[in-house]
Amino acid sequence: MKNFNLSTKQINKFQRLLDYIYGKRKFLAGCILLLFGLLFFTSCESESPVGGQEPNAEETRQNPPAAISITDTRQRAELSRIPFEYDDHPAVLNAYFAKEENQQYVKIDKAEIGDDVYVIIDTLNMPGNNIEIRLHDNNNILTGNISFRQYADAKKDIHDKEVFGELMAVNDGVFSAKVNFIHTQKDGEEAIEEDYRFAIFKLKLDSDDRSKTKSWRKDIYNNEKQQLDLFIIVNAGKVFNEKNVIYCGSNLPDEEKRKTDPDNNVFLDQEGKYLNVGYRPCLCCRNFTEEEFTNIIKGLRDGTQENNVSISTYHGYSLWASSDGIPDEDKTMERFCQVINTSFENHHINACLRKIHFLAQMYIETQYFTRTKENGVNLVYDPYRGRGFLQLTGFQTRSGNWIAGESDSRTKNKTGYLGYKEHSGVDVVEEPDLISNSLDLSADSGGWFWENGKLWEDGNKININLIADTDDITQVTKMTQGGRDRLIERTAARDKLKELFYFDDCEKGCINS
């Protein structure tokens, strides 16, 4: 049977919606309403004193969560079926963990300490109601309410998009959010009215106390299971009419438990349904996963500013928007992660600190991951203006002329486009845009420059990896850019990346490899 995506406030609202769809043929609307009532009538199992037939908890529990799409100004729910109200009784239908993916909140069962996750609470008849949740670990590695951090409620930014606010410490481990409005859809079209249904929490699975986060990671690592098994406890209190809330918890209690715990407000507390939260080793000596890399790039844009406004407000999370030569299929996090991993492997950028410093310099050089070619008209060093992830540039002779690169007569080492041509076998001297039009060459030229692309006065190569190992941002900037240009912004990027890498927990491997 085809699913209908309709609003879910009250049955009489549903009747009005059907009347709207079918004009004045109310007899047909009534028939369809009756048919849907017979086929789908369901709610939660409860001993709440509501007249009529008891709702079926098992059936409700099997109802898949609604898909929630993220739009510019609100969330949009595409309901898989209509969960009919029961005498207008307030209910919590479902609670689950999710991540943001392709403009939707997608249900998940795995995460890592440090990840951002969403908790979705699906309700009925609770518009604007405050919902509280607590997260517990079934393995008791962490006991009691776990005091993760929570992002402040979503607010509209200057582009009229809803974004979650600053991270807040929640020391008692009780998180709060309101049931907010959404648009519901019918067969891909907007329904007539807005509806209130979901409370959405955005949490970061860490503590505001770095030492506590480090202790959690250590406890997880040392435990036999090496993961938390998180479940959700929901408290919706009472609604406006002081009615008790029906909870449709996913673990059906036994007969004895039902007598003392009729509300069943615990969700996901069953084997195979927990959110498994693992320990993430540091990024020394291994590649980024796509998810790790995506979180780092998004976190960097969220956590750095220009004119007191976050970079993500200006650019969102799109990549290479000002690089017309890069094919659209390469402007993805997946491709960005691939080429960075390859370049880092090939050029010994293999320790956390080296990766942090490279990405901090690259972030500024590429104008926040938007350009692979230096901006401007008729630059004095054209055609060898900056290109690639570290803006490979030509060489200025003593007479003031700009050429493709320096060639040291003693060591035969070369710099700039001349040196990269010799390294790669690609004639970027004759066609410099080969670098800026290729994500692979942009990444590789940056890695080559970092390890081999500058010379000391004696003609020997400068390996910026070794300078990055000392964590001297001023010297790294001088070696990368030639001076101290935008040192404050580069330092801010370095510091934010340290946070995103959980650098305090770094095992500091690979430093000398």
Image (cartoon, rainbow, N blue to C red):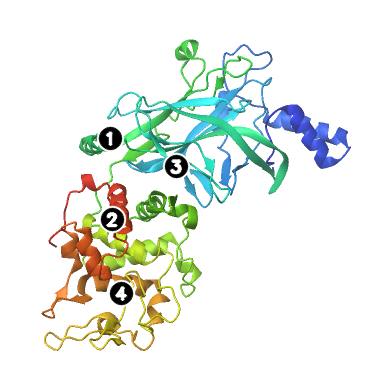
Question: As rendered, which of 428 and 245 lies closer to the eye?
Answer: 428
Question: As rendered, which of 301 and 380 lies closer to the eye?
Answer: 380
Q: Give the residue type that dot 3 points to.
A: Ile
Asked which secondary structure carries label 4, the reply is helix
Instruction: Tell me residue 408's x, y (percent).
Output: 16, 86
- In the displayed structure, 263 sits above or below 358; it is above
Query: Residue 108 bears which disc, if any?
Result: 3
- In the displayed structure, 431 sits above or below 497; it is below
Residue beneath the point at 30% across and 65% down? 485
Instruction: Tell me residue 425's x, y (percent).
Output: 29, 84
Query: Residue 445 bears which disc, if any?
Result: 4
In which image quadrant can residue 108 be found? Answer: top left
Q: Earlier in the sequence, mark 4 or mark 2?
A: 4
How much space separates mark 2 and mark 3, taking CA atoms?
A: 35 Å
Residue located beneath label 1 in the image: 209
How much space separates mark 2 and mark 1, taking CA atoms?
A: 22 Å
Task: For label 1, count other residues whose C-alpha is less than 10 Å away and answer few (under 14), some (14-19) or many (20+).
Answer: few
How much space separates mark 4 and mark 1, taking CA atoms?
A: 39 Å
Task: For label 4, count other residues whose C-alpha is less than 10 Å away and answer few (under 14), some (14-19) or many (20+).
Answer: many
Q: Earlier in the sequence, mark 1 or mark 3?
A: 3
Q: Earlier in the sequence, mark 4 or mark 3?
A: 3
Q: Give the residue type that dot 4 points to.
A: Ser
Q: Give the residue type that dot 1 points to.
A: Asp
Residue beneath the point at 58% across and 29% down? 123
Residue located beneath label 2 in the image: 491
Q: Earlier in the sequence, mark 4 or mark 1?
A: 1
